[in-house]
Amino acid sequence: MHLHAEQLAASSGKWMEAALAAFSNGSSSEDLAVHHVGVATEHLLKAFLAGLHPSLIVDGKDFDSLLYAAGHGERLQVRGSRVKTIQLGEAYDRAQKILKSKIPPRPKVWPLADARNGVAHAGYHDRAEVLAVFTSCLKVIDRLLVELGIGPDYWGHHKGLHDKLLIEGVEAARVHVERKLARARRIFAERYGHIGAREREIVLTTLAGVVTPGWADGEYSESTACPACTSRGWLMGHNYVDQERWTVVLTPLIFRCFVCELRIETEELSLLAVPLSGDVDLDVPPEDYYELLEPDEDQELGADDDDEQDYSARLRAYRKRD
């Protein structure tokens, strides 16, 4: 069987070496750079998953592939070259579910996947996103290397370039965040600066009562102070149950303020003066929290959509047990 963590990690290192070499060659090789770094990231994600069990990187809908990953491929004469494995996005999602706060949830707009797929399928990449592609994936790879017990030798002769890219990426992201904050403060001043302090407080309190995102599209929200204006905005993201403390925890994905139109994305939450990237303990038992949600009439107990939906279904069944 060829689904070995060591083999995948070694392959990732080779692709990363090629990616950084192409990046160092300048703009003429950027297409190769973003493609190769995407492959390197995918292989290292799969190395982490395969280290837990090879079945975690195969297509769950393909029985032959599952049989092969379980070590019984000879029963159906399954060849290793025919095994179907998951793609980059699914590998990231699976690893993130296991590592939780150690790597951020995959953003809906993901420059790494867009660049890799664009080059592979259409020979195109957004040149303005090259730095973002590298810095976002290097952060994830650094965390995976720790999990896999792989040292800095992974970076070969390009360790200095790796360090420089991370520094440049953080600085560029900080500038971008400051631009967002400045724009939000300007909007707030234009809309509410002419109103007296008392009247403004009444208006903002009224707005806060009207605009409450609640739960939508698998996202949960928690009110918090806006870093740009005097109003309160919303941290939105995914939730999970802390089994030890038996409470619901929110993992932030974005922050939004509907008063000044500020929107801070996942990677930017940690760059604020008061970071908003940490998990938020909602301090409520799961059985009480899920009572706030509308029951999903199409959800059948035991459906295999995903773990969070299954858990919600079990909670609804628990509440109806009497």
Image (spheres, helix red, strand yellow):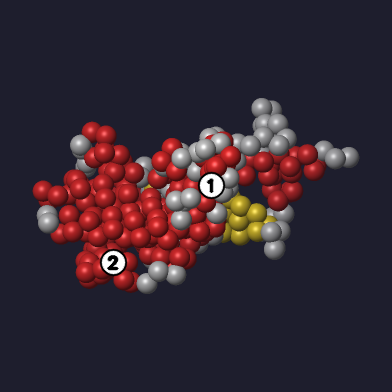
Residue 26, horizontal then vertical, whole percent = 12, 54
Residue 44, disc? none
- The image position of residue 221, as x and y in percent, is 55, 48
**Quarter of the figure with the C terminus:** top right
Amino acid at the residue labelled 1 = Ala
Left or right: 201 as drawn, with respect to 160: right
The one nearer the camera, 14 or 171, is: 14
Q: Which residue is disc 2 drawn over?
A: 155
Q: Is residue 100 above or below residue 121?
A: below
2 or 1: tag closer to the N-terminus: 1
Count residues near mark 1 (Cα–Cα under 10 Å), then give few for <14, some for 14-19, many for 20+: many
Identify the residue position indicated by label 1 in the image.
69
Tell me if residue 185 can be seen.
no
What residue is at 80 percent from the left and 42 percent from the top? 319
| Residue appearing at x 23%, y 33% in the figure | 122
Task: Confirm or deny contact between disc 2 and disc 1 (CB under 8 A).
Answer: no
> 63 left or right of 93?
right
- Does 161 sit left or right of 318 as displayed? left
**Residue 123 image point, x, y percent:** 20, 37
Amino acid beneath label 2:
Trp
The residue lying toward the viewer, choosing from 272 and 300, is 300
Which residue is found at the position 36% from the left and 53% from the top?
Answer: 41
